[in-house]
Amino acid sequence: MIKRQFYHLGEYVLWLQKVFSRPEKFKMYYKETIRQIDEIGLGSLKIVFIISVFIGAVTAVQLSYQFGDSLIPTYYIGYALREMEIVELAPTITSLVLAGKIGSSIAAEIGGMRQKEIIDAMEIMGVNTQAYLVLPKIVAAIFSIPMLIIIAAALSIFSGFLAAVSFGDFIPSDFIKGLTSFYDSYTVIIMIIKSFFFSFIIITVSAYHGYFVKGGSIELGKAGTKAVVYSDIFILVFDYLIAQLMMG
Amino acid sequence: MIVAKNIHKSFGDKAVLKGIDFVFEKSKTNLIIGRSGAGKTVLLKALVGLIAPTRGEVWYDDIDFYKLDIKAVRKLRKKVGMLFQGNALFDSMSIEDNVRFPLDMFTNMSDKEKSTQVNSVLERVELGGVNNKYPSEISGGMQKRVGIARAIVMEPEYLFCDEPNSGLDPKTALIIDDLIKDITDEKQMTTIINTHDMNSVMEIGENILLLDQGKVVWTGDKDRIIESNNKFIDDFIFASPFLKNMKNKAFGLEQSD
């Protein structure tokens, strides 16, 4: 079992070396990158919008329940919500959800190409398939996912504000005072750094599972599942490592 | 010309190819034939570099393929075209974009030149006017032709065809065979076809290699097949009692049951 995991780790690293090769033709890679930005970025806006609105609202409601009868000043709810969303919830939850949406789709797309011999056909043409199929997705994800995460953070704070003010006993000025208190831009930097790492993990782990798929439709389904599961695991591991390194 | 020298391939303990030596001649349709599981596809993939042999050499004219580094392999592959069993077309691209893909990726031709080249190969495979359709909108036979068009759009010197007739009716299969044969003659290519289609063997088999359990058991051309007394040929080509009797009748041999 452990030997097998090390085998995959080694294969993944070697495969990544081929992914980062010089493109045969920049114009083709550029076109593919634009297409991927559309799919990964714009295509995920709706789901990011929905989860951020609810996560922000739920967090605000739960914080107000926790802090409600305590001696902690009420404006702390705004402060705590902002910190939680920026440092943890927006980057991590959004990335976990995107791993499910984008990761399974990438594994299925590349795995399907493998099964239909399209990857072999491209190899025969002389295309560096690792680079052509994966590099534009990485560039597109590193460009789009951090933006999605910034949008998610903003939306969840806003929805938290609406939830707290609408259904709680808070006056907007208290909440806004909390939101603007003790602001440290370092937390935003942590969020951006996390989003770069998570974008890279989602794309490469999913594409790796699709690229090396063997067998038929059952194996393709399993590759999709593995892509999501391993992306999620790596996201959480790196979430911890980044937190430890930057805040520990 | 492509030369296979002592090609061995094993998957674990199972030896699939056991020392294949053969010369695939230029300007001829070279056929790899044999029963299912004989090693045809593995040999074809070893020749084209999709499966590395365990031992042996593959020479493209004076180039030892398995001694090349990855850059040189990719350069050589611009001279190679391949038609896949399942066609391997990009579902999300139109027919024109499918055929145009290698030109977009590897040439500095202008858009007009590319369009001219794409239209020319589509006309050559008798598919003029379908440029804007998608693979799912055309028949299996037409998809094969698109596959051929894409394989020859870069004007390759070597053409590989993996089971070009699979899934086609006999009439369409013959049309595809003739098309491959004509293109081979026109472009003076080295064409290697992996098939177990009897009609193909008798129609376009100019240089045939019969495999059985990973070994070469017969070589020759379509004219020599009929008169061959080779047991493997009999088992493969004249597998049915009907055909066996036909052959025996034709040559005045004893009839089988």
Image (spheres, coloured by chain):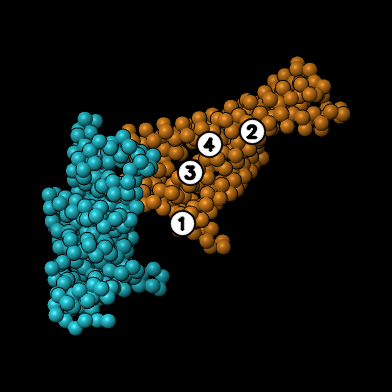
Chain colours: A orange, B cyan
Please give the label number shown on residue A5: none
Kind of element beneath mark 1:
loop
The answer to which quarter of the image holds residue B170 is: bottom left
Please give the label number shown on residue A51: 2
Kind of element beneath mark 4:
helix
Label 1: which residue?
Answer: A216
The answer to whether residue B54 is above or below residue A95 is below
**Badge nearest the viewer, 1 or 3:** 1
Does the CB distance between marks 2 and 1 fall below 8 Å? no
Task: Identify which residue is drawn at 32% across, 49% down.
Answer: B140
Pointer 1 and pointer 3 on the same chain: yes
- In percent of width and height, residue A152 lies at 61, 29
- Distance from disc 2 to disc 3, alpha carbons, whole Å, reads 21 Å
The answer to whether residue A102 is above or below residue A217 is above
Does the CB distance between marks 2 and 3 fall below 8 Å? no
Label 4: which residue?
Answer: A196
- Distance from disc 4 to disc 3, alpha carbons, whole Å, reads 18 Å
Q: Is residue B121 visible?
A: no
The answer to which quarter of the image holds residue A240 is: top right
Label 3: which residue?
Answer: A106
Q: Of marks 4 and 3, which one's residue comes earlier in the chain?
A: 3
Pointer 4 and pointer 3 on the same chain: yes
Task: Identify which residue is drawn at 45% across, 45% down.
Answer: A109
> Callout 1, which amino acid?
Gly
- In percent of width and height, residue A248 lies at 66, 40
Kind of element beneath mark 3:
helix
In the image: residue A20, left or right of residue B76? right
